[in-house]
Image (cartoon, helix red, strand yellow):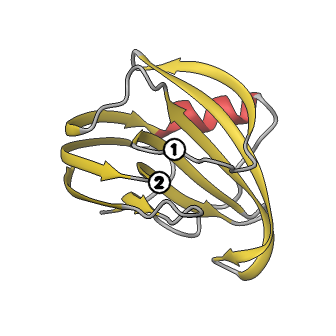
Amino acid sequence: MLISFQHRTVRYTGTYNPKGPGYLSLYGWTRNPLVEYYIVESWDVLAPGEPWTLRGNFTTQGNNYAFYTAQRVNKPSIEGSRTFTQYFSVRSAAEKKTGAVSGTINTGDHFDFWASKGYRLGNFEQNMFLVTEAFANGTQLPSGTSTITVS
């Protein structure tokens, strides 16, 4: 689902039944600096072996999140093969849900927390999307289903 602008309140409901690496997240890019960002609401296998660095924890709308960053070198981006930083807000394992899911994401709370830790976003030249993303990780192959409605 396509969502425009940077500070939004995004409500979602539906089903999410993952198996393996991947997540349900709000996702997007900024330029200057080039940043790929995720607000991860749920997952099965989060990110085994990924080079994430914990930058802090925070609470928004009664939900607890950890904030991580990762550096990607010469990887695909909205500007071609580039070096860029990834930001991840990850909902706590105790609060994540699979099966029937629903939630509200206030993007401004996440973006403001990231900035308070010295991690600013650039220009929102791309839209943000609520996505279910799956990826192969070693011998772990993803599968599953999702049906999500965004408002």
Q: Residue furthest front?
A: 139
Residue 46: image tag: 1
**Amino acid type assigned to the residue bearing label 2 in the image:** Pro
Q: Is residue 36 left or right of residue 127?
A: right
Across and down, in percent, residue 21 comes to 47, 54
Disc 1 + disc 2, Cβ < 8 Å: yes
Q: Residue at x 78, y 61 (%)?
A: 33
Could you tell me residue 39's position as x and y percent? 50, 43
Q: Secondary structure at mark 1?
A: loop
Type of amino acid at the residue the image marks with label 1: Leu
Seen in the picture, residue 73 relative to 66 is either above or below; the reply is below
Q: From the viewer's perspective, is residue 145 above or below residue 114?
A: below
- Residue 151 in view, yes or no: no
Which of the two labelled residues, at mark 1 and mark 2, occupies the earlier sequence position?
A: 2
Camera-side residue: 75 or 62?
75
Q: CA distance from mark 1 to mark 2?
A: 6 Å
Label 2, secondary structure: give it: loop
In the rendered image, residue 82, in percent from the top left (x then y), is placed at 79, 76
In the image, residue 132 sits, relative to residue 91, either above or below, namely below
Q: Is residue 147 left or right of residue 66?
A: left
| Residue that appears at 66% across and 47% down | 87
Q: Which residue is mark 2?
A: 21
Q: Residue at x 72, y 43 (%)?
A: 52
In the rendering, at what x and y percent does residue 42 appear? 39, 40
